[in-house]
Image: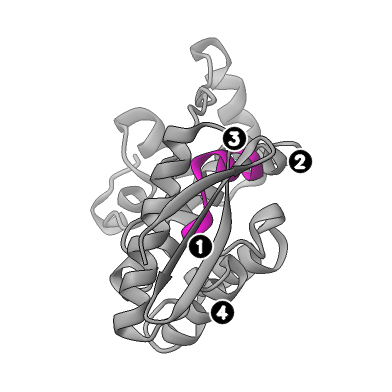
Amino acid sequence: SGLSVFRVGKVWHYRFQISGLRLQRSTRECTYARAVLVAERAYRAAALQSTGGRVIPTLRELVAQWLAATELTASASHRAGIKTFGRLHLGILAEIHIDQLTTELVERARNEHLQTHASSSANHWSRKIRLLCRWAVHRGIIVEVPFKVHMLKVQRKPRATLPIDLSRQWLDVLDDIASEPVRTAVRLMFGMGLRESEAGSARWEWLDVV
C-alpha cells in the first residue's frame, strides 16, 4: 500500500506495504521534510528489494558481504583496512540498516571517531563507509548512498628543510657516519636536486670525483 509518514513524539516514522510485506520504522528525523526524504528512500529500496529478493543489511553485515565478495579481487592491504574498519570503527552505525544511514547519523559517528583520532583518520573513515555503500548501490542492494558527508580540511605540515648556513655542518656529520657511495649520492641530491631513486640509479662509473 502507499507510503505514510507519521509522528511519534518528536520523531517522524514511516509505514508502507510492498508485496505483502508491511514495514514500519523510525526516520530518526524531527523535521517533516527530511523525514519524507528518508521515508521515500526506504520505500524505493524496499521496492528494489521486493523485485530482487535482497535483504537490506546492517553496516556490520555489509562489511562482511564486501569481504566475502572481494576475497579474490581486492588487495590484501585494502581488505585489511576494511576488516579493521568493521572490527573497530563502526561505532553507533554497526547495527543500523544501510538504507537508514542518514547524514546526521554518519556525522555523529565521525565526531565520535574524531574524539580519539586525527582529521586525516576521520577522512579515511568516511571514504571507507562511502566505498561500502557505493558497492551496495552497484550490487542493487540500495538505490543510492543515503548520506552526504564532506571531507574535513586537513592542515598540511610544512616539509622540513635544511637551512643553508647549517648545510656544511650537516654534511660533515654525514661524512663521519656514512659510506662513500651514500656521501656521494647525498651530494648529488643536495647539489643537483636529484630524487633519491635518480641518485641511487646513477652510473657511478661515469662519475669523476677528482
Residue 73 position (above or below residue 32)? below
Q: Amino acid at mark 1?
A: Ile
Residue 68: x and y, percent?
Answer: 49, 86
Closer to the camera: disc 2 or disc 4? Answer: 4
The residue that mark 3 highlights is 119
Q: Amino acid at mark 3?
A: Ser
- Callout 4: helix, strand or loop? helix
The residue that mark 2 highlights is 116
CA gap, disc 3 and disc 4:
26 Å
- Sequence-earlier tag: 2 or 1: 1
The residue that mark 1 highlights is 98
- Callout 2: helix, strand or loop? loop
| Horizontal relation, residue 83 to residue 14: left or right | right
Closer to the camera: disc 1 or disc 3? Answer: 1
The residue that mark 4 highlights is 64
- Sequence-earlier tag: 1 or 3: 1
- Sequence-earlier tag: 3 or 4: 4
Q: Residues within 10 Å of mark 1 (few under 14, many from 20)?
A: many
User: What span is colored magenta in the figure?
Assistant: 98-109
Name the disc covering residue 133, or none: none
Closer to the camera: disc 3 or disc 4? Answer: 4
Residue at the location (64% across, 56% down)? Answer: 93
- Callout 1: helix, strand or loop? helix
- Sequence-earlier tag: 4 or 1: 4
